[in-house]
Amino acid sequence: MSSKKTITSPKNKALEVNLNTNIYGSFSEIGAGQETVRFFFRAGGASQTIAKAMSAYDKEFSDAIYGKEEDGRYVTEPRLVKMLKHEVSLMEQRLERSVHAGKLFFSYANTVQTIDFAKKNKGHGWVGIRFQLDEMEDYNEIILHLKFHENDARLQQETLGILGVNLIYGAFYYGDNPRLLIESLYDEIAKDQLEIDMINFNGPRFAYVDNRLMSLQLVRNGMTNSVVFNPNGRNVLSSEILYKKNIFAMRGSFRPVTNVNMDMLKSGMRMFLEEDGVTEENTRIIFEITLSNLTALGEINERDFLDRADILGKLGYTVMISNYSEYYRLVNYFSKITNKRIGIILGVNNLLNIFNEEYYVNLSGGIMEAFGKLFINNVRLYLYPYIDQETNELLTSENLKVAPELKELYKYFKNNGWIKDVDGINEENLHIYSRDVLTQICMGEEGWESKVPEGVSKMIKDRVMFGYNKGFKLH
């Protein structure tokens, strides 16, 4: 089917699906009414599309149909997956292929919580579809997580209905172009109505799709401010893996990851583990790359991005891509997920930016508003020393030079334990600069191999990462 984007109206999309005699499936919607299937019923010709529509609102009914969840929750990805698999299985059992020759079966499902009565929790949900693009092929699957931003349950229901139509239409008409499909999810939906913060594509038609790039697409398109993927490259929901956990994060370009990064992590974590209530078991380590970092050289080089992500994944780390250029925004984001400890390891040069008032010219409350969000009780900034390449001076929190008007404020945060120098570092690593390592890799020079973690140099050479040995120098 065509991947050229032409139709945006949910009514017209539903009608086109209904008029396509090959598309046939079930709708199972929990928590926000049957808002998606309503479009198909109203568009006309619904009998050609809808095999079944249901909504198991009662928990006992839902458990009887889909089984109980161990954690007792209903608005979760495992619940959605069970719904999709169950409904597809029923279709395969109850609909004779000989009678429905040429039919492309699908199952659409959502499990959603809309805004509560007190309007404290704006609501979120999981939406997905299992579908065929060829009756002889296995099923494909698209699963996404959304967060509502509207303050009215009825409006949220309507938005959910439009999103569902967009997803179903996109699956069948943009299935060969996942990027276009993602963009089409916001047809007739404004970005301030809805946030999509996770999406995964699976199945034979998406075997070529790297879900990390789809995750990156969400941030690039302004659909969300941050995405997270695990060491295996699967997109995961940050609130699921970080909820009520201690978080230790390191921001960087990791182009490539070097021994400095590993020493920062090791020395910073050693001190973080000394904080009350912090153990390795209840702490999640995050390597964060900002979107501005990825676009530092112009347009995002997706191969370069995947090189960084592949290496970090090989080392066993979870990666976060965010639009939080300022540290206070990153901390503010984490603090909404967890009430536990938050540790940030950063170099002295990065702390200088934090204490630069020009950094906050677009913030109504200026630097004081930013500090109010950054220096909260459960946050610690761990400072890794830096050698000034011009003066060869070792910079720490003790000789850091901030603006005169901010000196006393800086002392206050330092003396009260929000800013701590890390100790026990490997000083040999202080002369390693990732930009120099990258240039050596590109020029095919020797000696850079000892500046990266074990196994990384072999990976870079074997897979020709970062322009290895291509004979050009980075500008």
Image (spheres, rainbow, N blue to C red):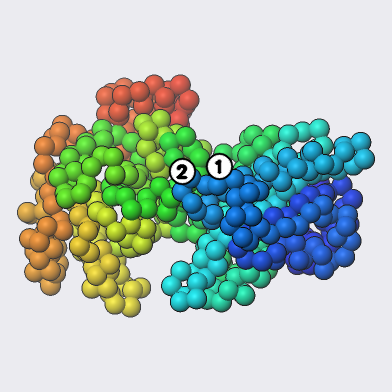
Residue ID at (60%, 55%): 60
Q: Tag 1, which secondary structure?
A: helix
Q: How many marks?
A: 2
Residue ID at (13%, 63%): 413
Dot 1: within a 10 Å radius of its alpha carbon, few (fewer than 14), some, or many (20 or more) residues? many
Q: Can residue 18 be seen here?
A: yes
Residue ID at (46%, 69%): 121
Residue on which the image places disc 2: 229
Is 259 rendered above or below residue 50? above
The type of residue carrying mark 1 is: Asn
Residue ID at (82%, 52%): 51
Is 117 rendered above or below residue 295? below
Q: Quadrant of the C terminus?
A: top left
Question: Residue 91: where, in percent of width, then height?
Answer: 78, 43
Question: Residue 207: where, in percent of width, then height?
Answer: 64, 34
Q: Can residue 300 be seen here?
A: no
